[in-house]
Amino acid sequence: MCSAGGRLMTKLYDKISQALRDNEGVLRIGKLKDAVDYQKSVDSFRRELKAWTEADSCPIRFEVSGYIAYGDTDFSEWSKKHRGRGKLTDYTVLRVWSRAGGQCQFPGCTKDLTEDPLTKSVGNFAQIAHIVAASPDGPRGCEDLSQRLGDKFENLMLLCYPHHRLIDTDVDQYSVEVLNDMKRRHEDRLDAFLASTDAYETHMVLISGVIRGQPTRIVQAEAARALSPRFANNRVLEVDLTNALPEETDDLYWRSGAEILKKRLRQALEPRPNERLDHLSVFALAAIPLLVLAGRLIGDKRRAELYQNQRDLNSWSWFEEVESADTTIELVRPETIAKDRTAVLALSFSQDVDIDQVRATVGGDIDLYVMRAAEPSYNWLKHRVQLDAFRKKYLQIQDELERKYGKTRTLHVFAAVPAPVAIEIGRSLHPKVAPELVVYDYIDGLYVRGLVIPKDISSVP
Ligand SMILES: [Zn+2]
Ligand SMILES: [Zn+2]
């Protein structure tokens, strides 16, 4: 990249990269008398650098006495090569911006960081500041914390340049605790403001049933926490099946279970006068066959968001760091298919479905489809994106079955899955292409035939 540069430029280059490393990508070029003077220096410096690098434009950000100028090309790409640390991911940057509402998070500043405070020209005038510096010898840095927090969202604040400089200069006053508090308060204020409007209304649907003989209980306050702060003004629609179901695990159990579920869900989803139930938030703990039916009854015409109970955490909140989400879903198809064989779908997500047991339960020749998480575990489902990935794959299989077997097919489903996945199966059943489902339950180490969900069952209007 360097052709015309002599020794002077080589020295300059070294100085620039050093300055960029030391100063989080901002290049200080000395004290100047005024802004005009500054602009002239920047322009000439930029010309020199352009000649030297042969780049179309100089991507360096210049800063003198609180003024910042931006280059025309992607600075972060350029700086990546010259700086010692990793670049923030687009997602992290987006999250810092959105959680800050585009404002400087220093108390009372409220500066809009999308325009220059002096000239009002539009641009990116924000600094993403580290609470604990990403390098141990930066502001508030230390060997352990810098390594651990680094470029994580929790460690980043959106600040205007003067406030970034202030917190990095006076690290005694602006300690880690003070800055964490600053960030949290600013985010909470924004959340509270958004929650105070009734624009995002949802209705909580709580479905509690019996799992392996044990009644389940959904703590309403825990569920409500998962909705905050996005949603407010919720009506709670409870479908409690815990006392309603007979104890037998025979055919009667499932048939009456289905009837009760249908009745209760219809009652719950009956809108009151002047009310529209067009957004539901579903929290459910019940046997798999009933959950699939619940999904079918809720349908996919209405918008519904499903939540997973994170048992270890007593929480229904989705995990936010999507980078770590395991969305890999393996799909194994039968080697050959035959229309007279029984089509079986095994879903191994909470644990591995025992295929030998499946064969023994169904009997005869089967065409076996398997969908499986890379590492099945009862806490596999942590992120919304995993549920999206599942739905996509499931719809794909449903289409495939219809093409291969025609419309009259019955599909036997053995599902070791978290509740939202079971509901999603039900919601994905499109009367035109969906097969009739026979959904099994797993009780005391055995698979038992649960519900038959016919093709023509319709959702609750
Ligand atoms: Zn900083
Ligand atoms: Zn500020």
Image (cartoon, rainbow, N blue to C red):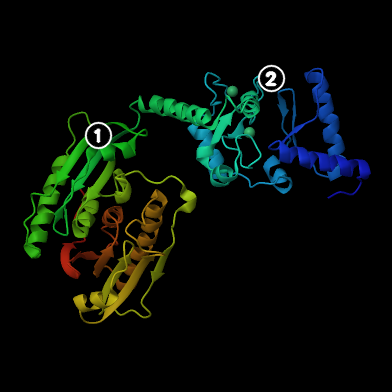
Q: Is residue 337 above or below residue 190?
A: below
Q: Amino acid at mark 1?
A: Arg
Q: Residue at x 56, y 34 (%)?
A: 131
**Is residue 278 something one can see in this rendering?**
no
Q: Indicate which disc, 2 or 1, sits on the residue closer to the N terminus.
A: 2
Vertical placement of residue 415 versus 221, above or below: below
The image quadrant of residue 314 is top left
**Residue 140 visible, this orientation:** yes
In depth, the one of 185 and 138 nearer the eye is: 138
Q: Residue 95's spot in the image, x, y percent?
A: 51, 38
Q: Residue at x 19, y 75 (%)?
A: 361
Ligand 2 is in which quadrant of the figure? top right
Query: Furthest residue to the right?
Result: 6
Task: Name the mark nearer the viewer: 2 or 1.
Answer: 2
SS at circle 1: loop
Q: Which residue is mark 2?
A: 119
User: Which residue is found at the position 91% from the left and 45% from the top?
Assistant: 5
Q: Which mark is residue 113?
A: none
In the image, is 449 to the left or to the right of 117?
A: left
Q: Which mark is residue 276?
A: 1
Q: Position of residue 373 (x, y in %)?
A: 39, 63
Query: In the picture shown, does residue 202 fall above or below 186?
Result: below
Q: Disc 2 on helix, strand or loop?
A: loop
Q: Could you tell me the amino acid type at mark 2?
A: Thr
Q: Is mark 2 within 8 Å of ligand 2?
A: no
